Image (cartoon, rainbow, N blue to C red):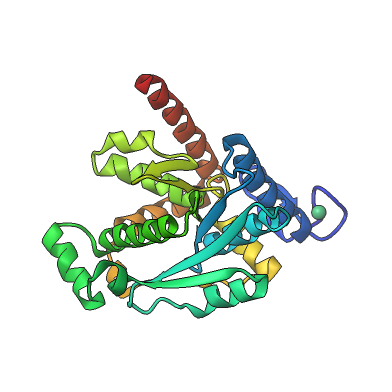
Amino acid sequence: MRCDKCDTDASFEVKASGHWLCDSHLLYRVEKRIKKTIRQWGLLSSDARIIVALSGSSGSSVCLKVLNDIIRVNPKQSLIAVTVDEGLGRDMIHAKGLCEDMGIDHHIILLSDSCGIDPKDIAKNAKDEGIHPCDLCAKLRKKAITQFAKEHNARAIACGDDMDDELSKTLLTIIKGDVTGISFPGPIKKDDDMTWIKPLIDVPSAELDLYVCIKGLSSVKWRCDNSAENRMDIVKELLDDLDGRHPGTKHQMMSSVKQMRDICAKLDD
Ligand SMILES: [Zn+2]
């Protein structure tokens, strides 16, 4: 099969449209979408320090790579990568290696140091609060990174949330009966006096996995022992199944999510 954009061999089918792309055009497609989101929403100011929440996943690795490509040519902008070690076996080697390869300052925050919770108590504390351990971990991670960003005078924290994350979070708010959460999706969120930016929300996870593969970026898929029956993972599996049977579902849903966001914004005015 030939690439629909040039005359070389294709390596990827965009199932939603039926187009085939070669490695170069897949990279171009991913970067173009990320840069469009950054431009449209003004995610980067010309003189700011950005913290990248680097979990080591494909999304966070691509986020770091693309932001670094943009920021390194501007002496007024800077980038610091941060990985939170929950003490639950997260692989730090890939995140560390990626930052070394790109010459980016990398910090590891121990969750037990920043929040004073012993890793083995996370599941018990979550049960006491009536929430899933992954939700408690996410809350504590966010708090730790926000604290780090404030201490380092950062303007924003960038994370590698992609289209699948955005759709799953929106669906989950509906499943949980918390429809107010629908108004929040989007590439900018202000929380606890800090701005979180999500430049990758228009790119599906599968394309990011291919991007790191083609570019040879270090990334890791890690699943915590506490993550069994995590509803976010279950919703993602459902979406994958639906999109596999009906290609284009994720893009159509993303379009609906954006329309809902616009309607909520108008209601707030
Ligand atoms: Zn091509």
Q: In this rendering, would 149 be left or right of 27?
A: left
Residue 169 versus residue 57 in the image, above or below: above
Residue 221 visible, this angle: no
* Residue at image point 26% right, 60% down: 136
Q: In which quarter of the image is the C terminus?
A: top left
Residue furthest out toward the right: 7
Query: Front-most of 192 and 181?
Result: 192
Q: In this rendering, would 178 be left or right of 38?
A: left
User: Percent position (x, y) of residue 224?
Assistant: 35, 72
Query: Front-most of 107 and 30?
Result: 107
User: Percent position (x, y) of residue 194?
Assistant: 41, 47
User: Percent position (x, y) of residue 13?
Assistant: 68, 53
* Residue at image point 74% right, 52% down: 28
Q: In which quarter of the image is the N terminus?
A: bottom right
* Residue at image point 56% right, 48% down: 199
User: Percent position (x, y) of residue 76?
Assistant: 65, 52
Query: Front-most of 154 and 91?
Result: 154
Query: Front-most of 16 and 111?
Result: 111
